[in-house]
Image (spheres, helix red, strand yellow):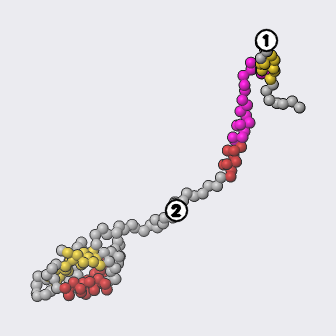
Amino acid sequence: MRSRGPRNRMYAMKDGTPRVERYRRKRKGKSPLVLNLAPMIDVTFLLLIFFSVTTTFRKAEGFLAAKLPRDAGRPVVAMPITPIIVRIEPADVGFGGYQLRVDHFVNAPATAGELVAFLRDIHEQPGFSNETPVVLAATPDVAWDHVVACWNAALRANCKNISFGRQ
């Protein structure tokens, strides 16, 4: 059996030293090397088709589908920017009396008993609710009993966000 390695030919030189000469293949004709690209293009398209068919497309994480309500023809009412401010001041006439003023409203109640109905009427108006903040702003010379009476009136009117303020 012949070896497939390079073939060598040995012969002796004139002085007697051995010399090894390798055979070289000589190409017949100087034709350029041609690379056949058709099989490589076929394999590329087969891989492209394979990956496009086997890929599963998932929804991106972190994005939620939002189903917003459609406009049902109801008028859009903006929520009030400022809270309902009830100012408690000493009365001009009499001793120990008080008077109420409500900012941005003309028909202010006179007593804490009238304040309950007044606040309930405001809650029924568009843009107001029982979550609308109510601020009781009393001057320093008003008796604490009158301030507490207005606080209780706001509670009876089902106000959920009541706070004290300054004038």
The C terminus lies in quadrant: bottom left
Which residue is at a point 52% across and 62% down the rendered structure image?
Answer: 64
Which residue is at the front of the view, 10 or 167?
Answer: 10
Which residue is at a point 16% across and 85% down the rendered structure image?
Answer: 143
SS class, disc 1: loop
Work out whether residue 106 can be spotted: no
Question: x, y percentage for residue 16?
Answer: 79, 15
81 to 143, vertically: above or below: above
- Amino acid type at mark 1: Lys
Image quarter of residue 157: bottom left
Magenta stretch bounds = 22-45
Which residue is at a point 69% across and 40% down the rendered structure image?
Answer: 44
The N terminus lies in quadrant: top right
SS class, disc 2: loop
Q: Which residue is mark 2?
A: 64
Question: x, y percentage for residue 123?
Answer: 33, 77
Q: Which residue is mark 1?
A: 14
Question: x, y percentage for residue 107?
Answer: 23, 78
